Amino acid sequence: MIDTTPESPPGARQPPSTAREQQSLTLIPGLPNDVGSLILSMVPYSHHARIKQTCKSWNRVLSSKPFFSTFLHRRRNHLLCIFPQDPSIASPFLFDPQNHAWCPLPPMPCNPQVYGLCNFAAVPLGHHLYVLGGSLFGIGSFLAITISLPLLPWLFPSDHHSPSFATFRLSLRDFTWRPRAPMLSPRGSFACAVVPRSGQILVAGGGSRHTMFAAAGTRIRAAERYDARRDRWYPIEGLPGFRAGCVGFVSGGGREFWAMGGYGASRTISGVFPVDEYYRDAAVMELDGDGGWREIGDMWGDGERVRAGKIVVVENDDDDKSDYPGVYMLDGDEILRYDMSTNRWLCESRVPRKAPYNSSFGVVVVNGELYVLTHLCIVDMTETRRSRQHRRAGTLYIQIYNPKKKTWRSLVTKSPFSYPIDINTTVLSSICL
Amino acid sequence: MTQLDRLSVYHWLNAWCIKPVGGALVRQEPEYILLALMGSPLKKIMLCSSEKEIFSVEEQVMVQHSVIINNMIEDGSYNHEESKIPLDCVDSKTLKKVIDYCTHHTHHHNDNQEDLEAWDAQFLNVDSNGLYDLLMAANYLEIRNLLDLIYGTIKNMIKGKKIDEIRRIFNIKDHGFTPEEEEQNRKEYPHFY
C-alpha cells in the first residue's frame, strides 16, 4: 500500500523549486498545498500537538494565524480543561470528549516565591484561557497581606496564605503563557463571567480561602471588569455584602451579571469551630444601567436547608428562545435547577452512580451538557520490570447529563494523571474552539 | 416520477413544447421531452480521459454524482449525439474507478449502510498515489460524497497514528527539523513517536 516516489498526478500544480525547498513547503507529498491544508484542518484540535511534530511544514501551517482562524470557523471542538493542582507545578490537561484524546498543556510560568495556587478561575475567551487570581502560600504573600489588610479582619493570623492578583493567559494556538495585567484587588474563589461578544470579563467578590483550610480566609466586596483588548482592569461598583465562594454568570441576554450564593460572615460553634454563613440569595448587577447591584430575595424558603453545592451555568444555544441560561447545582449526588421566575431551586435529576468512597464529584459544563467527573487512581503494587511510567494511569469516569433531553450517558477514559487528584478542588473549565 | 406528476408535466409541456437543440429552440413532441426529463435509463454520455480513452457511462449515473457534469448537461452545452466530455485532469485508470464508484452508488443506493461502507472501504483499498489521484479527480468533478469519503480516510490516516507512522504513510522523507530539534521533541514527548 505504501508507494515509493511522490509523483505529481496530472494537473497538480507544484512550485518549480529545488527538491529540498519543495519538501519543506509541501504539506502532503503528492497533493497540492491547498488540499493538504484542508485535510489538516479536518483533524480535530486535540491531535494538533502531536501532528505538529511530524514535519516543519505541518508545524508552520498548524501554528499559523490564518489557518487557525479558518479552523475556528469550520469546526466546533469542545474541550475540557483540567487543572488538578497549582498549574505552575502540575501540567494542566485538555481533554477532547468526542475523540477521547488528552493533550498536556505547558505549566504556567512559575514565581519561585509562591506555591500552592488554588481556588483560581480559568476563563475561556476566544481561543485563550485566562487564569485569574486564586489563593496561594508564599514569601511574597506578606506584601499581599499588608495591602489587603485594610479590607478585612483576619480570623486566623497564623495562616500565611493570601489571595493573588495575578492574571495569566494561555493561547491555545501556540501553547504559550503570557502574563497579563494583574487585578486591582487580589482574590480567590470569586464570581467570574465573560460578557458574550464583547471580550470582557467581570469578577466580583472573592477571598483568600485556601483548599488546605476548610474555613478561614478573607472575603471582599470589590468588583472589576477586564477589557481583553486593552489588557486593563477597571473598577466597578462593589457587591452589597462581602461575598466569597460565589458563582458568577451573565444572564438576561448579556444585560445582567449575577453573583450567586457564596459565604459571607462566619460564626463559630462552641466558640471554636468556624462555620460559614452561606448566602441564601444572589446579587445582580445591571450592565447597561448605572451599574448598581440589587439583591434577589432568598432562594431558599424558611426552614429549607440551604444547599451549598457546586453551581454551574449552561449557556444558551443560538436557537434557544430564552434569554436566561440554565443554572444547575450539584449537591451530593442530586442535581437542582434554578428557576428564575420563582427564585427557587427545583429537583432536576440524580447522578446515576455515586462517587466511590464518599468522595465528591467535579462538575463542569461542556457543549451544553453537565459533565460530572470522578477520578480513580489505583496504585499498581505489582510493578514488573517492564512497567513504564505511563502505564500507571488513572481513570476518569464522566457521567454526562443533557438538560434538554434529560438523559444521562457516561464515558470512561484513561487519564494521564498517574497520581490521585482531588476532583473536588480541581479547577475545571471548558473551551470551544 | 409518480403518475400524477407525469400527467401534470405532460400538460405543461403540451403548452410549451420547446426544447433547446444545438443552441436553437425547436418545437418537440411532448412525449420525447418527457422521456428526456425523466432521463432514459439507457441514455449514455462519453467521457474522455487525459490519455484520450473514451468511456461510455449512463447519463443518470454521472449527473447524480458529479456537479460539473450535471451543469454541463443541464445548460445544454453537451450534445448527446456528437460530443464527448474531455477530462484532461483525469487519467484512464482513475476515471474508470470514479465511474465505478458512481455506478455502484446509483444502483445500490437502497442498500443498507453497512454494505455500502464495506464496499467503500474495499474501493479505497489502493496505494496512496491512487488515492491522491482519486481525490484530485473527485475534486475536479465535484463529486461531494466521494470527496468526503476520501477526506475522511486520509484524516483517519493522520488521526490515530504516531509520528513515525505518519511520516512513513505519507512518505515525508525530510521532516525539516534540525537534529537537535528532533531529539528535543523525542525526549519531551516520547509517546508521540
Image (spheres, coloured by chain):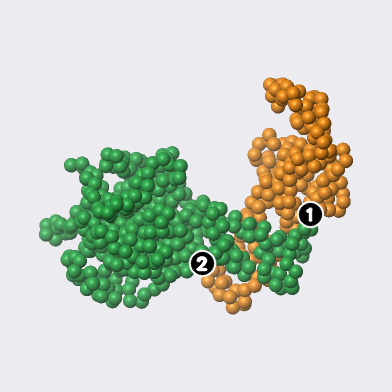
Chain B: what color? Answer: orange
Amino acid tagged 2: Asp
- Percent of width and height locating residue A383: 47, 65
Q: Say if A395 sits above or below B33 in the image.
A: below
Label placed on residue A354: none
Q: Is residue A378 left or right of residue B102?
A: left
Chain A: what color? Answer: green
Residue hosting label 1: B89
In which quadrant of the rendered image does the N terminus of chain A lie?
Answer: bottom right
Q: Chain of mark 1?
A: B
- Percent of width and height locating residue A196: 40, 53
The residue at 66%/36% (across/down) is B112
- Percent of width and height locating residue A108: 41, 69
The residue at 49%/63% (across/down) is A172
Res. A379 image quadrant: bottom left
Most extreme residue toward the left is A271
Label 2 neighbourhood size at 10 Å, few (<14), some (14-19), many (20+)?
Answer: few
Q: Secondary structure at mark 2?
A: loop
The residue at 75%/26% (across/down) is B16
Q: Chain of mark 2?
A: A
Res. A233 image quadrant: bottom left
Residue A4 visible in rendering: no
